[in-house]
Image (tube, rainbow, N blue to C red):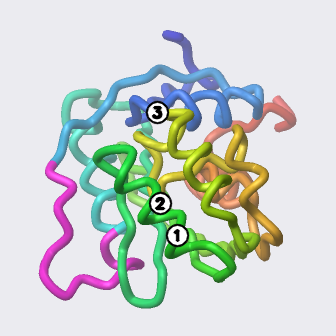
Amino acid sequence: MHTSVGQTRLVLASASPRRRELLGQLGLAFEVSAADIDETPHPGEAAQAYVLRLAREKARTVAARTPGAWVLAADTTVVLGEELLGKPRDEAEVREMMGRLSGRTHEVQTGVALAGPTAEHALVVRTRVTFRALSAGEIAWYASTGESLDKAGGYAIQGKGGFLVAAIEGSPTNVIGLPLGETLELLARAGLPLPWSTP
């Protein structure tokens, strides 16, 4: 999609089809330009600092090659206790993650950053998610679906993984990867025209 919001060019710095779909649901026109950065956490880095740093780095990386545009970026991680759960490498790691998340509450944190010609805005959104107590059969079946492999924490709440979840406290779209309400706040703070804005 190679269009603009009013006279303002908006770029989504993400290869994620889920983020692209969520942003598209708002009726905003935007371009897509993925940012390729090192996503390794720094030693001792807290989850909130980690997702905020990566979102900012993604936004700045793409902004540097799209002068004049506003660039929106996000990064999501799952936090269990103090541990960051990234994307599982294989089916065995999915099973291990699901076993640890089973019957427990974890937190999904997403850093969202908007970098533009005149300013940079960023925030972190946190959502608490509680899993059902899962049987070994449920875990094995879900791991076998292959849905988990490119998802932080190893599950997709908007897909087959919806059955894993007993309760959510906070933004559901944050768990998918882009908290829509807070993203709109950033766009409004930057003065970008929104679909319902008065011309």
Task: Give percent across and percent down for residue 178.
Answer: 60, 50
Please name the residue shown 18% across and 45% down the image: 37
Binning the other alpha carbons within 10 Å of mark 2 as few (below 14), some (14 to 19) or many (20 upward) gives: many
Where does the image place residue 28, in percent across and percent down from the top left?
Answer: 68, 28
Callout in the foreground (1, 3): 1
- Residue 199 x %, y %: 82, 29
Q: How many marks?
A: 3
Q: Residue at x 79, y 70 (%)?
A: 168
Decide: is 48 above or below 78: below
Q: Which residue is mark 1?
A: 99
Q: Residue furthest front?
A: 137
Q: Is residue 113 visible?
A: no
129 over 31 or under it: above or below? below
Q: Say which element carries label 2.
A: helix
Depth order, front residue of 174/157: 157
Look at label 3 and name its amino acid: Ser
- Looking at the rendered image, the disc whose residue lies closer to the viewer, 2 or 1, is 1
Residue at figure coordinates x 32%, y 30% from the top left: 34
- Which residue is denoted by mark 3 in the rendering? 16
Identify the magenta region.
38-50
Task: Tell me the distance, in whole angstroms, between the alpha carbons under discs 2 and 3.
Answer: 15 Å
Secondary structure of the residue carrying numbered label 1: helix
Real-space Cα separation, disc 2 to disc 1, in angstroms: 11 Å
Question: Residue drawn 17% across and 61% down?
Answer: 40
User: Mark 2 is on which residue type?
Assistant: Gly
Residue bearing the label numbered 2: 153
